[in-house]
Image (tube, grey):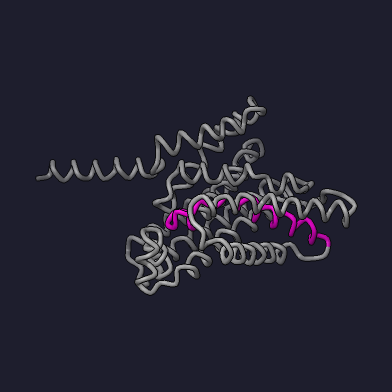
Amino acid sequence: MKLTQTDVWRGVAILLVFFVLAWLPAVPGADGWLSIVVPITMYTVLATSWAIFSGPTHYVSLATAAFFGVGSYTLALGLDSVPYPLLLLMAAVLGGVMAALVGWATLRLSGVYFVIFTLGLAELIRQVFTWYQNNMGGTRGSYVFTDFTDAHIYWQLLALALLVYLVGWLINRSRLGFAIRIIGGDESVAKHSGINVAWSKIVLFMVSGSVAAVVGAILAPRFVYIEPAMAFNPQLSFMVVIMALLGGTQRLWGPLMGAIPFALVWEIIASNFPAQTTLLMGLAFLLVVFYIPNGISGVVLRWYHQARARQGVNHE
């Protein structure tokens, strides 16, 4: 894979942006808005990793909450006996293995069947954890006591976001990315072209599952107390899908444009209309699908190409 001069300058610009963002906790009064910035960063990572798989394949996965919950419980159950960095690695491995198993069993399904299965996965695992803790653990939840502040969690999520962007960029430039784009266009054509369709989809799904599990592990200290209903909350899966679709999945930076505005608006909705969140989430999903099918990034790219076209006409 050959790097162009544009790639190099783009990479330098991205690194500078992340470097500047890393200093955010040092800004006076940052403690107040870190409570909002941390969720935004979390949703950016989750939505971007979701789009890496679901964007090119067009398989809508609602399994984010399942992977997130497994990561949260990995940290909660192992914090007293296993070093923290190793727990993050374990969460990534468990998320990847679970995604591989789910992918092997379900990625031959398509359409509504895959969506229903991934939605039910979080509920299934939640019930398993609830049964285990009620009958074997003596308590339904687990405490997570660490010295981490919101700043520590933010830095970890920011580093993970940079890693996700790097992985997504490498995938897009690789043979796997090329194969996935063909699969998203027409699986029959991909099969006749000699592409291992099942393997390609499973590998990409494993990336998404591993990232979601690590995010769950990183966020666990912020919740202090982990219990199944919170760790495997299906609302998280729907939020990630809405944010990714709102931003657009055609470009790697698209989900970022959906995560920031939607997370800010959702904070207002959740604090002022807590009983109507499910209804408003469904309404938001309908509005995005019907009125911004290509997301904000799609609109921005269309305006950009129109401006370039007009500029070319003027030069002539």
Q: Residue furthest bottom?
A: 194
Location of residue 210 by image quarter: bottom right
Tell whether position 10 is magenta. Answer: no
Residue at 45 percent of width and 43 percent of height: 247
248 to the left or right of 213: left
Tell whether position 55 is magenta. Answer: yes
Residue at 33 percent of width and 60 percent of height: 6
The N terminus, quarter of image: bottom left
Q: Would you place residue 82 above or below residue 29 in this image?
A: below
Q: Position of residue 84 (x, y in %)?
A: 74, 62
Residue at 42 percent of width and 57 percent of height: 56
Residue at 70 percent of width and 64 percent of height: 85
Q: Nearer the viewer, residue 75 or 207?
A: 207
Count of numbered circles in the view = 0
The C terminus, quarter of image: top left
* Bounds of the magenta segment: 51-80
Q: Would you place residue 285 above or below residue 17 in this image?
A: above
Q: Position of residue 223 (x, y in %)?
A: 74, 45
Q: Nearer the viewer, residue 129 or 222?
A: 129
Q: Position of residue 249 (x, y in %)?
A: 43, 50
- The answer, for residue 19, to whether it is visible in the render is no
Q: Position of residue 95 (x, y in %)?
A: 64, 62
Location of residue 70 by image quarter: bottom right
293 to the left or right of 39: left
Q: Residue furthest left?
A: 316
126 to the left or right of 109: right
- The answer, for residue 164, to whether it is visible in the render is yes
The secondary structure making up most of the magenta span is helix
Q: Residue furthest top?
A: 272
Q: Nearer the viewer, residue 113 or 210?
A: 113
